[in-house]
Image (cartoon, rainbow, N blue to C red):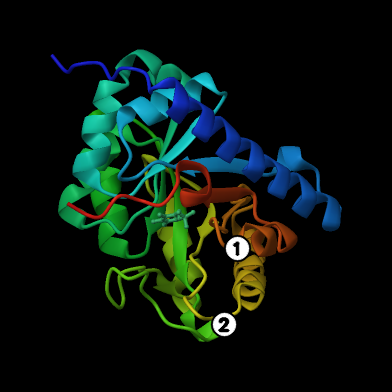
Amino acid sequence: MVEQAGTAEPARREELRRGLERVHERIGAACRDSGRDPDEVRLVVVTKYFPASDVRALVELGVGDVGENRDQEAATKVAELDDLRDRLTVHFVGQLQSNKAGSVARYADVVHSVDRAKLVRALDRGAGRAGRQLEVLVQVDLRGAAGGSAGDGAGPGERGGVPLEAAADLAGAVAGSDHLLLRGVMAVAPLGGDPTAAFTRLREVAHGIRQSHPGATWVSAGMSGDLEAAVAQGATHLRVGSAILGSRPPLR
Ligand SMILES: *Cc1c(COP(=O)(O)O)cnc(C)c1O
C-alpha cells in the first residue's frame, strides 16, 4: 500500500495559486504579442523535487499536466497520487537511461526526452510489456543553433538531445514503434545562448519532421526564464517549474 499524499498547507496553496496566475498572465501576454490563441499552448507544471502534496494542490487549482525528471522520484509521487491519476497527464522531461525506460513506461503518459535509438527500443518494449501506448517527443540538441552551452548546473552534457541532423531519423524510429506515438519535438534552450535563435531552429526541425509525420504537431519548448520566446516561436507545450513552485530545494 502506498500512502496517499495529503494536501498542502493553506499558505503553500496560496503561493502556488499566485505562481500559476502569474505564469498564465505571462502566457496570455506572450500569446497576444504573437497573435496566438492561448488554447494552443499547454502548460506542463514541472514538479520535480517538490512533494506530492504540491501536485495535489496544483490539481485542485486546475492543473492537468505535470512534469518530472527523475524516475524514482516520479514513480513514488505518481503512486502517492493514485486517486487523482485519471485527472493527470504525467510528462517525463528528464534525461533517461535505457535501463529506467521500463519503469517510466509504466507511469508516464508522455516522454519528452527521447534522444537515441536505444532508448526508443527500450521504451517501446516497456510500453508493450505494460500494455500501454506512450506519447513521445524527440529531444533535439540546439547547442549548434544558438551558441551557449549544455548543462543547467548539473554538469556539462546533462541536457541531452539528438543532434539536429539526426532528429528526422530518430522521429522515424519512434513512428515505426508499435507502442509509441510520435507527437513532435522538444528542446531546452542552451545556457547562455539566444533562446529565440534556438527555438526558431526547433520550429524548423518540427516543420521538417511534419512533412513525413503530419501528426507530430507538438513543440515542447520554454521554461520559467524563456517561455515568451518559446510562445513567439510556436511552442505548443511549455515546461515551467520554478516560476510556479519557487526555487527548487537543493538536491538530496
Ligand atoms: C526542470 C526542468 C524544467 C523547468 O525548469 P524551470 O526553469 O524551473 O521552469 C523544464 N524542462 C526540463 C527538461 C527540466 O528539467
Q: Which mark is residue 226?
A: 1
Classify 10 Å Cα crowding around label 2: few (below 14), some (14-19), many (20 and above): many
Give the image location of residue 238, x and y in percent: 57, 50
Q: Is residue 141 left or right of residue 92?
A: right
- Mark 2, ligand 1, within 8 Å: the answer is no
Give the image location of residue 48, x and y in percent: 34, 45
How many numbered tags mark residues here? 2
Q: Is residue 5 left or right of residue 31?
A: left
Which quadrant is the N terminus positioned in?
top left
Quadrant of residue 117 within the rendered picture: bottom left
**Residue occupying the point 62% across, 57% down:** 227
Classify 10 Å Cα crowding around label 1: few (below 14), some (14-19), many (20 and above): some
Q: Please, what secondary structure does the residue beneath circle 2 have?
A: helix
Measured Cα–Cα span from mark 1 to mark 2: 14 Å
> Viewer-nearest of labels 1 and 2?
1
**Residue occupying the point 26% across, 55% down:** 250
The relative height of residue 45 versus residue 113 in the rendered view (above or below) is above
